Image (spheres, helix red, strand yellow):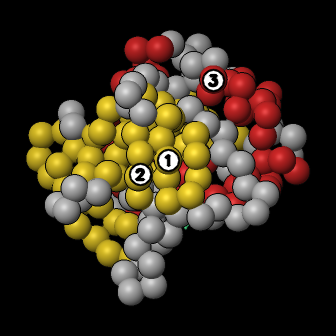
Amino acid sequence: MVKPIGVLALQGDYREHIATFGAIGVEAVKVRSVEEIDACAGLVIPGGESSVIHRLSATYNLFQPIRERIADGLPTFGTCAGLIMLASEILDKTDDQEPFGGLDVSVRRNAFGNQLDSFETDLEFSGIESLVHAAFIRAPIVERVGKDVEVTAKLSDGRIVGVRQGNVMGISFHPEVTGETRIHALFAEIVAAAR
Ligand code: GLN
């Protein structure tokens, strides 16, 4: 039996991720326990509020297991708050917030400030032929990338909004809310190749 992709369902827009995979015929299920995560071939950390995802993962005894599985090579994809949780360093984090890690990057939370909380734009994405329509909602920016990190997307001013390191992908925006399925398809390919 082919293992599905698990979407961490503690907080945030996990339903939209499951629906996006469904739209391209990829089985995805919500996960809230170590057993459920271990029955999956890949993991998605959704958008939402990263400090809450951190806190709830600790409450559910998932923080350390998730951290270890990502370090052991579990293909993982984070959007927005999910990207923040995959960073090795969070800038402007809440006091006790810690990331799962997986990407050697520094990510600043809420990087667009109050005047430009949320916006949409089209951008190039490596591996995707035509422009991707991207929705940014209180979004983070990647301010530093380590030497093994590939930049997959930038804003027109050069700020980094997409990164990949091995089987771990993170993006600042939310394809799962705009009907954009191609980035989820890329992740499904990474998961299939790693199976
Ligand atoms: N600002 C949120 C955070 O810090 C992320 C917002 C989002 O996921 N849309 O986690």
The Cα atoms of the two marked residues, 2 and 3, are separated by: 20 Å
- Residue 152's spot in the image, x, y percent? 28, 40
Q: Amino acid at mark 1?
A: Ser
Q: Earlier in the sequence, mark 1 or mark 3?
A: 3
Q: Is residue 164 left or right of residue 64?
A: left
| Residue located beneath label 3 in the image | 71
| Residue located beneath label 1 in the image | 106
Q: Is residue 158 left or right of residue 11?
A: left
The Cα atoms of the two marked residues, 1 and 3, are separated by: 17 Å
The Cα atoms of the two marked residues, 2 and 1, are separated by: 6 Å
Which residue corresponds to the image point at 46% horizontal and 24% vertical from the top-left? Answer: 167
Q: Amino acid at mark 2?
A: Val
Image quadrant assignment for residue 62: top right
**Which SS class for mark 3?**
helix
Q: Is residue 87 left or right of residue 35?
A: left
Q: Amino acid at mark 3?
A: Ala
Q: Nearer the viewer, mark 1 or mark 3?
A: 1
Which residue corresponds to the image point at 71% horizontal and 48% vertical from the top-left? Answer: 98
Q: Is residue 155 left or right of residue 75?
A: left
Q: Which image quarter has ligand 1?
A: bottom right
| Nearer to me, 91 or 161 | 91
Crowding at dot 2, Cα within 10 Å, few <14 / some 14-19 / many 20+, comes out as many
Q: Earlier in the sequence, mark 2 or mark 1?
A: 1
| Residue located beneath label 2 in the image | 142
Crowding at dot 1, Cα within 10 Å, few <14 / some 14-19 / many 20+, comes out as some
